[in-house]
Image: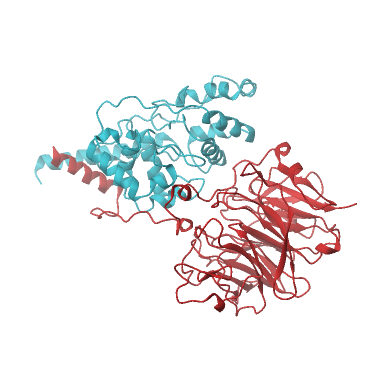
Amino acid sequence: MTRWAAGLLSLAVAVALALMVVSPRLGGQQKAPAAPATGSGPKATAKAPAAMPYAPAVTPSELAAMSYPQRFAALCAACHGANGRNETPLTPVLAGQPSLYVITQLFLFREGRRSNEVMTAVAKTLTDDDLRGFSEFIETLPPVPPPPPDTPPDPIRMDRGRALAEQHKCVFCHGAGLSGGQQVPLIGGQHEDYVQVSLRGFHSGSRPGYTQAMTEAVSQISPEDLDTLAYYVARFRGPVGALTGK
Amino acid sequence: MKQVRSLVVLATLCCIGLPALAQPTPPPAAEPGWAKGRPKTDTAMKMAPVPAFPIPTAPDKLPTSKFKLPPGFKVETWASGVLDARGLREGAKGNLFVSSLFVANKVYVIPEQGNHQPKVIIDKMPYATGIEFHDGSLYVATNTKIMRYDNVEDKLDNLGEPKVLYDKLPGGNDHSWRYLRIRDNKLYYAIGAPCNICDPGPYGKIFRMNLDGSNIETIASGVRNTVGFDFDPKTGDLWFTDNGRDWFSEELPNDELNHVTKPGQEHFGYPFCHQGNIPDPEFGWGKSCDEYVKPAALLGPHSASLGLTFYRGNMFPAKYQGAMFIARHGPWNRTKKYADISVAWPDGKGGARVETFMTGFVENNSYLGRPVDFLVLKDGSMLVSDDHAGAIYRISYGK
């Protein structure tokens, strides 16, 4: 090994360690994924929000008097976007999610099983009626397509992602359009960083599902392939794979 | 640059300690046990087990007023807000115990006096589903172990640590939840097949053990998944419901009501023969249904027949005394949904006659509620748990 290569190696180690040190700031279980093994990771991983103190601009009694659309605007929109899509790092797109999926996740946050500091803090304040009200409202938010990508998707990686999605039977539950339904989320066009962290969480066991479906589905998939799947579903624009020129 | 990138990759891999550096393409994800045998058609591919809803139905939205029963019977809401209510057992000092399955991970107690508010006595325990009460102790069985909490009704604020009677249950997710009964100082439990259809190995059986966990004996073999059994008060015979295999067709096979007449010596067919007369398309080769004990009655395709309880009270008309109540939880892998409470009478010749008893759980092909288990109270009325709505109903009879 040449001297410069050794230097680069130690630099890389330092960077990787730094990433690991930073990760606890993300709070709860949503640790930063270790640097993706394939080089072209999601652009947002480095700058995740430090566990921000949750301080909505309204008091609980004011909230209680509002309709669920108003409460969504006051409580959720800052991170998730007024229309249910925002570019906040590690924050999922809610637009287009089925209400049953949403209520199961709010339930897991409230029970403390799915851990995320911010979401658990919010969910602990919600009654059963609130869980129902928020999930039913969120289902009415129409899907919002992602903004056009800065760079066109890598066709080789997209092909690999599509093959993995077929091999690992993602479409069994998420559907050919990756649009979900019932207790299964919409994942087509979901943020890559969020999908990546979720898949890795299901794989390591740190992210519990409402059922065992995802834990079982990803148990045999390598971290590299999980990242490729995240890359693929985030850029997925329809079942025919139009973006890859096929 | 390529070299640099590979070094970064290497360094990263070293840091996060990936176990397999040069692993070849991994095998596809193991198909979940419930999906084995599922046809690859669009309709079937959209069907998957549906867990209970995460929020109990609000008291004023419960389906109680929609239930239909034979003349003279009435049903009321006995408790609401009991998330994922599954098994029902009664203590000796006026307490009802309620277990749960996939959602709540809890065991509740509900005092029979007062306003029937559930109180959580066991929490964060996955598959806390099998419960039984005996001599002051609450027995709890999960997918991995069987435990006993002594003097439980005197320690409802803090049960303390249980005594573990047995910790070698196979775990897993498929058919790994328990149903318990105690009779003549033996604890009866079942271990279902770890899949929809497969060779169940040493499982797919009803077992019993001494109350200290020793001396395990097989009571019945060839049992796919029973989540309801009870002893005929007249004969002492064990009767059990068994959930038939999935994905054979929408209409076949039926779930079974079975009758054990020679404990330990009988095989009820799984995985070789279903409903007594359908050889399995894969495991049935070289076998004949005549080699296995036939069901006493058929309980409907994919009906998910769960709790089974002999009525031992005095309130219901004579016709129902000594009859079995059966909770048909309703199918998840069948296009047309149905669920009800049925009642069955041993016909004295090894079979049984079945009648529908209470309907109203389904509206517009959706579940409003799904019955699971029963408990006959001292006054002769009968409680029914509903995990979908998170409620307990009370059925009574009067002029």
Left or right relative to B271: residue B18 = left
Residue A147 percent across, percent down from the top left: 34, 24
Residue B265 percent across, percent down from the top left: 60, 80
A36 w.r.t. B286: above or below: above
Quarter where residue B2 is shown: top left
Q: Residue furthest left?
A: A2
Residue B149 percent across, percent down from the top left: 67, 61
- Which color scheme does this rendered protein use? by chain
Q: Is residue B302 visible?
A: yes
Along the line of sight, the residue nearer the viewer: B390 or B75 = B75
Colour given to chain A in the rendered image = cyan
Q: Is residue B137 visible?
A: no
Quarter where residue B93 is shown: bottom right
B71 w.r.t. A72: above or below: below
Along the line of sight, the residue nearer the viewer: A27 or B40 = B40
Colour given to chain B in the rendered image = red
